Image (cartoon, rainbow, N blue to C red):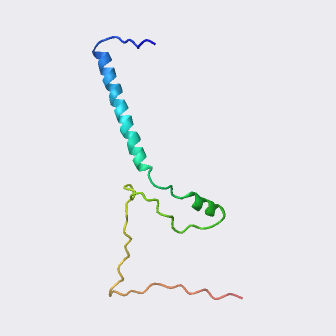
Amino acid sequence: MTETKTAEGPATEAAKQRLAEARDASEVSREQFAERMKGKPTPTQEENDLAAHGVHILEHEHDGSAPDPNVQVTKTSEAKKPTGGQYQTRQAAPKPASA
C-alpha cells in the first residue's frame, strides 16, 4: 500500500494540527464519560421489575455515584406564627332553607 500524499504548506500543517487537537479532545471526552458511568444504574433492573408488578418504590438503592452537581438543595421554610394583633375574619352563615 502507498501512503496518502498531501500538498505541503501552512494550510496542511494547520489542518493536521486541528485534527490532532480534535483527537485529543475526543479522548478526554471518552475518559470523562467512562468516569461518569461508573456505578450502577438507578433504578436498577430489579427495581424496574418490581415496579412493573405494581410495587411502589419509596427509596432507590444507592448507585455509588457522587451527588448531582446540577441539583440545588432548597430549604423549605415556614411562616412564623402571628404574634399579637389578632383580627376577626368574616364568617358566612348558611342561608335558611326556604319552604
Could you tell me which residue is drawn at 53 percent across and 84 percent down? 92
Instruction: Give coordinates of residue 31: x percent, y percent.
Output: 39, 42
Relative to 38, does residue 73 appear above or below in the rendering?
A: below
Could you tell me which residue is drawn at 62 percent across and 60 percent down? 49
Relative to 19, does residue 89 appear above or below in the rendering?
A: below
Left of 60 or right of it: where is 70? Answer: left
Q: Farthest residue in the front direction?
A: 1
Q: Dividing the picture into quarters, in which one does residue 34 lie?
A: top left
Badge count: 0
Q: Dividing the picture into quarters, in which one does residue 30 lie?
A: top left
Instruction: Give coordinates of residue 95: x percent, y percent.
Output: 61, 86
Q: Farthest residue in the right direction?
A: 99
Left of 55 or right of it: where is 74? Answer: left
Relative to 54, does residue 18 appear above or below in the rendering?
A: above
Q: Quadrant of the C terminus?
A: bottom right
Instruction: Give coordinates of residue 45: x percent, y percent.
Output: 58, 57
Could you tell me which residue is drawn at 62 percent across and 63 percent down? 50
Instruction: Give coordinates of residue 6: x percent, y percent.
Output: 36, 12
**Which is more toward the observer, 91 or 74?**
74
Could you tell me which residue is drawn at 27 percent across and 15 percent down? 10
Relative to 9, does residue 82 appear above or below in the rendering?
A: below
